[in-house]
Amino acid sequence: MNKTPLLKKRYHVINQIGEGGMGKTYLSTDTKTDRSVVIKMLHIRKLDDWKTLELFDREARTLKNIDHPFIPDYIDFFSNKSENDPSYYLVQEYIKGDNLEKIVSQGKRFTDEQVTVIAKNVLSILSYLHGLRPPVIHRDINPRNIILSKINKLYLVDFGAVSDAIRSSEYGGSTVVGTFGFMPPEQMMGSAVPSSDLYSLAATLVFLLSHKMPGSIPVKHMKLDYKPYVKTSAALFRFIDACLEPDVSHRVANAQDALAILENHNLPSMSKMPRETADTKETKSLALPFGSLIKVTNMDVDCVSITLPRNPGKSLAFFGLSTIWFIFIFAWTAFALSFAGLFSLFSVPFWIAGVFLVAKGIGGMKNETIKLTPGNIELRKSILGGKMILPLERITRVANGSRLPRL
């Protein structure tokens, strides 16, 4: 018979499974329900400040009000007022499995399909959390806090860094909590919004695909330069890029929009795609507002082509005007020639203007294309094969006051 005393006369501690600077985690049995549970214990005497206790209490209150199948159930929260070792305890459902960091450390290589499933599962949880009133922001999504159970179900754990959006915005910031490399810039400044969790999720996917901690990956133009270390599908590249934007105003706004990126652009893996030629290159048109005549095509992960529609109405107007113009100039030139041949030379600029009007009319009947790549912007007009390539450095100079040449 086991003589180990029960916590709160209910919980039988089996063994310690974790330890931090201010507390421990135990695998235990709830004798009331005979369920396996996890008990997190916080030592009051080891606290550096009361903020840690506030976060622990907030985690318990948050979990108590959460009901999601892939967030471990809240079971109990209590304290031990012992003079020798006053402590607080948080009891949750035990999920049998390993976290993603441990799985990767064992050499596991996730496929694109598996990473996509992981992303969709976490986004589903975030959609629920961010949809609460007030929205709940996890603030510490990383591979260690995502558990893959023995029956291949994903769970999000450790809500010790949780905050709500209203509280964070009302007081203009909050304590900086999270994991280095997985936190977006605004969170490192003490402020978190729902899309902060999306940044952390994208950084987690980078870790799963590269086996490198985001904090060890170089930063280029304030953004994680992860692509040299990752081979994945175009859809995952787009998703990660949309969520890893350092500027929160440019980042995908919410979990629903992020999920749409994965579901609407599920392209095959880049490593499985054949070498592209003029005959084999696959393109994909992107969705635009209803009624739009502009065509946007994804040539590949780093190239977008924008086709501006023809304007036949404008062309007809130019053709009509040029016809009237030529009739007038022809009559004027004939009249000038009947009196003095040299005088008719004054009509030459007007003939040139007429040719320009005709060219404008023809140009309106042709499509114009803008091709965007990471290094260049290419402007192409069908008429006379006009084409101009502008390096991004040139665009920067234009933004600073230089003139942009006409095509």
Image (cartoon, rainbow, N blue to C red):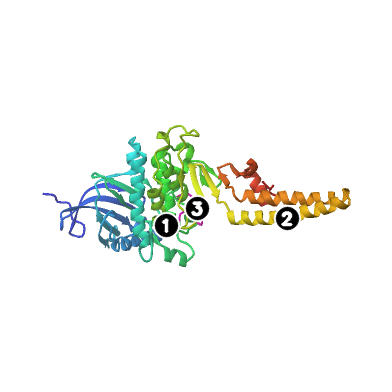
- Position in image of residue 211 (x %, y %): 40, 38
**Label 1: how many Cα within 10 Å (few below 14, some 14–19, many 20+):** many
Q: What is the tally of numbered marks visible in this picture? A: 3
Marks 2 and 3, how far apart at CA: 61 Å
Judged from the image, the secondary structure of the residue bearing numbered disc 3 is helix
The magenta stretch spans which residues?
243-252
Mark 3–mark 1 distance (CA, rounded to whole Å): 17 Å
First in sequence: mark 3 or mark 1?
3
- The amino acid type, in three-letter code, at marker 3 is Pro
Residue at numbered disc 2: 325
Which amino acid type is shown beneath numbered disc 1?
Answer: Asn
The stretch drawn in magenta includes residue 246: yes
Whether the residues at callouts 2 and 3 have beta carbons within 8 Å, the answer is no
3D distance between C-alphas at marks 2 and 1: 57 Å
In the image shown, does 380 or 144 lie closer to the viewer? 380
Compared across the picture, whether 317 is left or right of 267 comes to right
Q: Residue at x 65, y 42 (%)?
A: 384
Residue 316 vertical placement versus 386 (above, below): below
Question: Residue under circle 1?
Answer: 254
